[in-house]
Amino acid sequence: MIAPSVAGIHDPRGMAMSRLLGISSVSSWWASAEMRQIVASGRRVAASIMSRSAGSASAVR
């Protein structure tokens, strides 16, 4: 029986998984901060579009 750490080094899937897990933890933290900014800007854009469309709709009437 090979030790898991040694097996992980020689097993490409184990290496890929550990690399993915390490990257995913960092990228998920970065992505969550990025997503919060995207969502916030998206809400601002949606609010401005809504107010603009509401203003133009009332102007048309």
Image (spheres, rainbow, N blue to C red):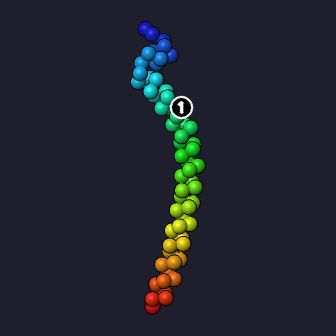
Image position of 48 with respect to 2: above or below: below
Q: Which one is in front, 5 or 45?
A: 45
Judge whether residue 42 can be spotted in this image: yes
Instruction: Identify the residue at horizontal 50%, vertical 16% (top origin).
Output: 5
Q: How far across and down, in percent of the image, does residue 43 sit?
A: 54, 64
Q: Residue furthest bottom?
A: 61
Image position of 20 with respect to 5: above or below: below
Instruction: Identify the residue at horizontal 56%, vertical 66% (top origin).
Output: 44
Image position of 10 with respect to 23: above or below: above
Across the whole image, how many numbered discs are drawn on residues?
A: 1
Q: How far across and down, in percent of the image, does residue 14 sit?
A: 44, 23
Instruction: Identify the residue at horizontal 56%, vertical 61% (top origin).
Output: 41
Q: How far across and down, in percent of the image, does residue 1 sit?
A: 43, 8
Secondary structure of residue under mark 1? helix
Q: How far across and down, in percent of the image, does residue 3 sit?
A: 48, 12
Quadrant of the frame with the C terminus: bottom left
Q: Residues within 10 Å of mark 1 (few under 14, many from 20)?
A: few
Instruction: Identify the residue at horizontal 50%, vertical 74% (top origin).
Output: 50
Image position of 8 with respect to 43: above or below: above
Q: Label 1 sits on what residue type?
A: Gly
Judge whether residue 4 can be spotted in this image: no
| Residue beneath disc 1 | 22
